Image (cartoon, rainbow, N blue to C red):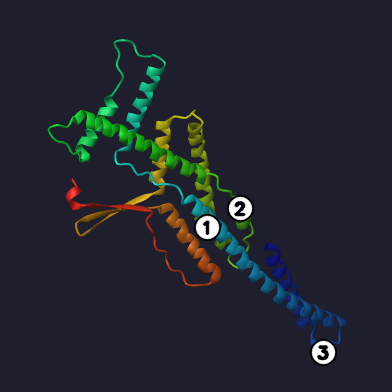
Amino acid sequence: MKAKKWLTMITLVITAVSLFIAVIIGKNSNCITYDIAMAIFGGAILGFIMSLIEYYVERQRAMEEFWLQATKILNELKKIKYLDVDAPINLIVDAMYEDDTNTLKEKFHFLNEEEKISVNAKKNLISWYEKNIPIPFDENTDVNMRLNRLYDSKMAGYKEVFLQCMNSYREASMVELGNFDNAYGNLDFIIANKYIRKKAYELIYDRLRKIVYQFQFEAYHFNLLEDGKGNFPVCILKVSKLNQEYFLQKEEKIQGYTNTLIFQNVFDDIEDSLEKFRCRTYRIKYVEPKKIPVSGKMVSKNNEK
């Protein structure tokens, strides 16, 4: 695209200069310089027209390639999974840290005969279950046993959810940026070059690259965990922080029901910028894309507390 741009500008300058010389000399001067200037003008204007056509063809091709590469990366990043757990993260992290500590103490015999394993975090999480999760029982139910089974089942489920989220960020961090870098570098316009490139850089290019680099940084800790060297509670906090940054929860009440919808707000903004870029490419009217939730759930009013 840069070559087409400069060829167009050079032929335009030669066209203008040769025409200016021809006008200054004048047709009636009977000077060979006039004939040479007109000959150069004729060739230059033909070259300018051809190079201008080639420039606009290459301009559209370069913008299409940038949009295509950006869309590919965005679609890969959007595959990250939403962290959906039914209890406060801090209670879950405390309970997992406590379980891991107790396991290590028992494995390496750090407990003396009088010392008991800690269950404070477990009790706090179970207490939260009692207050917030309906648990059916009757006079023959062993409530403590039921709660402990619920705790064990929930903890196993949480670990699976956390691992799935971590793996989704690890996979997203492997996105290749080479073609994307080349596509942005190839953008070079005759008109409003600085403005268009700046908008593409700030709203699309730089944001996608920073997200990939952020995922790569956090994936380092997830990879350590995969190799058996990481800290699971620490990784949970990192996933939770990423979840808060890249997912937005919205609630709407309809006829006694509360709909909770989950949106990828950051990616929705980038997708909106990409649509504006696409409209500029094809010179069509911009229509704001509809934001589609990636997850959601409905709760009846009777279940609300």
Query: Looking at the image, which is closer to me, 104 or 120?
Result: 104
Look at the image and tell me in which quarter the N terminus lies: bottom right
Q: Residue at x 33, y 11 (%)?
A: 112
Q: Earlier in the sequence, mark 3 or mark 1?
A: 3
Q: Is residue 298 left or right of residue 65?
A: left
Q: Secondary structure at mark 2?
A: helix
Residue 91 lies, with reference to residue 207, above or below; the image says above
Residue 118 lies, with reference to residue 177, above or below; the image says above
Residue 217 lies, with reference to residue 37, above or below; the image says above
Where in the figure is residue 304, as x and y percent of width and height?
19, 48
Q: Secondary structure at mark 1?
A: helix
Q: Amino acid at mark 2?
A: Asp
Q: Residue furthest top?
A: 113
What residue did someone put label 1 on?
A: 71
Q: Amino acid at mark 3?
A: Asn
What residue did someone put label 3 on?
A: 28
What residue did someone put label 2 on?
A: 181
Residue 42 lies, with reference to residue 98, above or below; the image says below
Q: Earlier in the sequence, mark 3 or mark 2?
A: 3
Cα gap from disc 3 to disc 1, whole angstroms: 60 Å
Residue 90 visible, this orientation:
no
Where in the figure is residue 188, as x and y percent of width and height?
63, 62
Which labelled disc corresponds to residue 112?
none
Q: Residue furthest bottom?
A: 28
Look at the image and tell me in which quarter the C terminus lies: top left
Q: Residue at x 23, y 36 (%)?
A: 129
Cα gap from disc 3 to disc 2, whole angstroms: 56 Å
Q: Is residue 254 left or right of residue 244?
A: left
Dot 2, crowdedness within 10 Å: few (<14), some or many (≥20)? some
